[in-house]
Image (cartoon, helix red, strand yellow):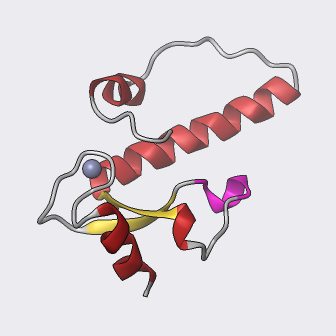
């Protein structure tokens, strides 16, 4: 199963913050919606629910930004809670 392969590669904890003994969720490193491979273990990592939510929110924002830049609408660039969390915490791979 993919989950076991990911644990073998990354270890038992969250791939971003390293926390163990919490529920971990399989996450696509490159979101399938962004063209990432859905079943490639190379594109999977295990995240705690907090990191998973933060990453999903970041990806949603990135998609919205791409949409708005392609349609010519400018964003305000106001930093959000998740931007702050990203700076404080976890800088792995993305
Ligand atoms: Zn985490």
Image coordinates for residue 63, horizontal then vertical, percent: 68, 40
Image coordinates for residue 1, horizontal then vertical, percent: 43, 88
Which residue is most to the right? Answer: 71
**Of 73 and 82, which appears nearest the observer?**
82
**What residue is at 39 percent from the left and 50 percent from the top?**
53
Magenta stretch holds residue 33:
yes
- Highlighted range, magenta: 30-35
Tag count: 0
Task: Answer above or below: position of 27 versus 68.
Answer: below
Corner quadrant of residue 64: top right
Quick check: 42 left or right of 48?
A: right
Task: Answer above or below: position of 29 versus 66.
Answer: below
**What residue is at 45 percent from the left and 45 percent from the top?**
55
Task: Answer above or below: position of 61 versus 56.
Answer: above
Image coordinates for residue 21, horizontal then vertical, percent: 11, 66
Quick check: 71 left or right of 2?
A: right
**What residue is at 26 percent from the left and 64 percent from the top?**
11
**Of 94 and 66, which appears nearest the observer?**
94
**What residue is at 86 percent from the left and 29 percent from the top?**
70
**Of 2 and 78, which appears nearest the observer?**
2
Image coordinates for residue 54, horizontal then vertical, percent: 40, 43
Which residue is most to the bottom? Answer: 1
Which residue is most to the front? Answer: 9
Magenta stretch holds residue 11:
no
């Amino acid at each position: 199963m993919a989950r076991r392969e990911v644990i073998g590669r990354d270890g038992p904890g969250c791939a971003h913050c390293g926390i163990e003994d919490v529920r971990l969720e399989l996450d696509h490193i490159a979101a399938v919606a962004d063209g990432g491979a859905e079943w490639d273990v190379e594109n999977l990592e295990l995240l705690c629910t907090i990191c998973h939510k933060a990453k999903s929110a970041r990806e949603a924002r990135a998609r919205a930004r791409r949409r708005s830049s392609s349609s010519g609408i400018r964003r305000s660039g106001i930093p959000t809670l998740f931007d702050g969390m990203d700076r404080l915490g976890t800088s792995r791979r993305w």
